[in-house]
Image (cartoon, helix red, strand yellow):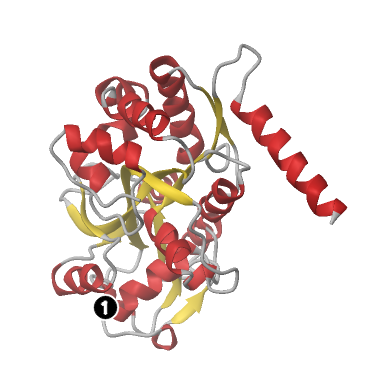
């Protein structure tokens, strides 16, 4: 019993230290991703705009990514977090990568930030659609990772299973090396374009992207509402002469469920009222919009964010 009481006291003291800065102002930690990734860089920009426009000393913290951020926000280690919308849905429903750990509901949505496209990269000219992956050696990400479940969703929509391909469970970098070395025929990479690994591949090897469109895209979006249509504009990658249509999940900003409404309203306003200025500092800011922020979400919004979007004429589900 004494241990439980001590644990509660320590948790309260820790939260107090996080939420109150030396000057007495509010302070928040934003879980992002690795220091070399988009989450960390974009999170750093968002943190500055939150600090300058909402009066909150917000700090971007490097983490292991979506799952760690969801768990961290729910546990109080972070107050904000950037996450993939599909991983967020897994947490809310207690499925896929959260099936073993169980459902997590201690967070709410502030809004979608930018698209993370499902990109299928190949150097095999015979692969022109997802269906053409049958019988090929394909990297589908580490077992249980977000990329893995994205790949399975695409294969399923094309009438294929994991057994219809020679599955390779590789990281981004290992996938790129495998394509260069001819050890795999194609790789699923889920990230916001232009993705550095793909830029390098298209520049040095002539690799191309496989579209995910038409019936396959429609099936994926019907089965999994966290996917949205996404167009990779011509010229995004070397040798890409036409637009590539695919689907995407969204990098999404979440907040601890018990954060007060006024604070979340001010954070939401600080970001979306300054979208143009943010875009000038980070290219991903160009995708910030009310429409993008409010579509494709499968977990409820925070009431503070819902208040902001209502002022812009958009109604979202909030708890």
Q: Residue furthest right?
A: 2
What kind of element bears circle 1?
Answer: helix
Residue at (32%, 80%) from the top-left corner?
Answer: 156
Residue wearing tag 1: 157
Quarter of the image where one finds residue 16:
top right
Q: Is residue 287 visible?
A: no
Please, is residue 138 above or below residue 11 in the view?
below
Q: Quadrant of the N terminus?
A: bottom right
Residue 141, how many percent across, how many down?
A: 50, 66
Please, is residue 92 above or below residue 126 in the view?
above
> Who is closer to the viewer here, 245 or 294?
294
User: Is 82 on the left-hand or right-hand side of 14?
Assistant: left
User: Is 183 on the left-hand or right-hand side of 304?
Assistant: right
Quarter of the image where one finds residue 165:
bottom left
Residue at (17%, 48%) from the top-left corner?
Answer: 241
Residue at (82%, 45%) from the top-left corner?
Answer: 6
Residue at (28%, 61%) from the top-left corner?
Answer: 227
Residue 236, how many percent across, how many down?
A: 26, 42
Q: Is residue 168 visible?
A: yes
């Amino acid at each position: 019993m004494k241990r439980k009481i001590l644990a509660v006291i320590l948790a309260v003291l820790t939260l107090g230290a996080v939420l109150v800065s030396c000057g007495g102002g509010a302070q928040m930690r934003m879980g992002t991703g690795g220091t070399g990734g988009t989450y960390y860089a974009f999170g750093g920009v968002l943190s500055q705009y939150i600090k300058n426009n909402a009066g909150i000393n917000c700090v971007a913290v490097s983490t292991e990514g979506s799952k760690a951020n969801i768990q961290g926000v729910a546990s109080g280690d972070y107050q904000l977090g950037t996450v993939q919308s599909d991983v967020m849905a897994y947490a809310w429903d207690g499925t896929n990568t959260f099936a073993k750990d169980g459902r997590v509901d201690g967070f709410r949505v502030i809004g979608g930030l930018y698209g993370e496209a499902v990109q299928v990269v190949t150097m095999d000219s015979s692969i022109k659609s997802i269906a053409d992956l049958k019988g090929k050696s394909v990297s589908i990400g580490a077992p249980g990772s977000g990329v893995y479940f994205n790949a399975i969703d695409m294969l399923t929509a094309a009438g294929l299973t994991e057994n219809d391909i020679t599955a390779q469970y590789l990281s981004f970098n290992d996938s790129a090396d495998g394509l260069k070395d001819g050890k795999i025929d194609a790789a699923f990479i889920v990230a916001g374009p232009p993705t550095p690994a793909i830029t390098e591949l298209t520049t040095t090897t002539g690799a191309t992207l496989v579209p995910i469109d038409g019936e396959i895209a429609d099936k994926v979006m019907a089965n999994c509402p966290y996917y949205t249509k996404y167009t990779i504009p011509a010229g995004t990658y070397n040798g890409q002469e036409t637009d590539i249509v695919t689907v995407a999940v969204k990098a999404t900003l979440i907040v601890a469920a018990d954060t007060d409404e006024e604070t979340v309203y001010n954070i939401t306003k600080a970001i979306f009222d300054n979208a143009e200025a943010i875009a000038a500092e980070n290219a991903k800011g160009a995708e910030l919009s009310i429409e993008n922020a409010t579509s494709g979400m499968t977990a409820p919004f925070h009431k503070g964010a819902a208040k902001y979007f209502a002022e812009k004429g958009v109604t979202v589900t909030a708890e």
